[in-house]
Amino acid sequence: MLLEIGCLSQRFAAQEVARVLRPAAVYCFRTPNLWHYVTLGSKLLPHSAHLKLANRLRGLPSHAHDPYPAVYRANTPRTIKNLCRGVPFEVLDLAMIEKEPSYGRTNAGLFFLMMAYERLVNSCDCLKALRANIFGVLKRPHG
């Protein structure tokens, strides 16, 4: 998500996105949800652990690109809504999405455990806060 640029404040980044959009234009984004187990693990583990584990767990070759350092500053629906207050953005949609577990595909037991999680959090709206991604649509108002 563009609002996750580490060297900028989230409010400044949101203001800049709004500034370059035409009136009534929309800004669509995808960002990881802070409350998903992968994101929580990423936030709690040092970056050196990401470098050792991420590509291996995703089944990628060791020479694939390294994971980027994690920041997680605008990664909950509440934080995104609060960020949009005072910035010319209207929140049109924040959809919580959980897809198949790509991090578990190298180990059958881990994959089935993660699939059970995916099925559980997709089974009812009361668990949507635990889904992996936030897909958002923000709109810059007219004028």
Image (tube, rainbow, N blue to C red):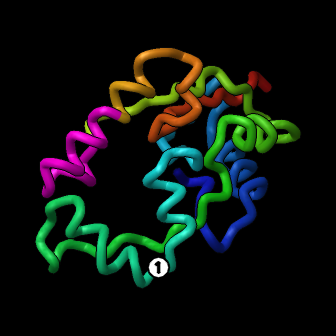
Whether residue 26 appears in this view of the structure is no
Q: Between 61 and 91, which is closer to the camera in this rendering?
A: 61
Label 1: state its secondary structure: helix
Q: Which residue is mark 1?
A: 47
- The part of the image, by quadrant, that contains residue 13 is bottom right
100 sits to left or right of 93: left
* Vertical comparison of 94 with 71: above or below: above
Query: Which quadrant: the C terminus?
Result: top right
Q: Residue at x 50, y 45 (%)?
A: 36
Q: Residue at x 21, y 40 (%)?
A: 112
Q: Between 30 and 61, which is closer to the camera in this rendering?
A: 61
Residue furthest out toward the top: 124
Segment tinted magenta in the rendering: 101-116
- Residue 71 lies, in percent from the top left, at 59, 66
- Residue 140 lies, in percent from the top left, at 70, 30
Residue furthest out toward the right: 86
- The part of the image, by quadrant, that contains residue 118 is top left
Q: How many marks?
A: 1
127 sits to left or right of 141: left
Q: Between 23 and 3, which is closer to the camera in this rendering?
A: 3
- Residue 77 lies, in percent from the top left, at 67, 35
Q: Is residue 105 magenta?
A: yes
Q: Amino acid at mark 1?
A: His
12 sits to left or right of 50: right
How would you rate the neighbour count of disc 1 (Cα within 10 Å): few for under 14, some for 14-19, many for 20 or more?
Answer: some
Q: Residue at x 69, y 67 (%)?
A: 8
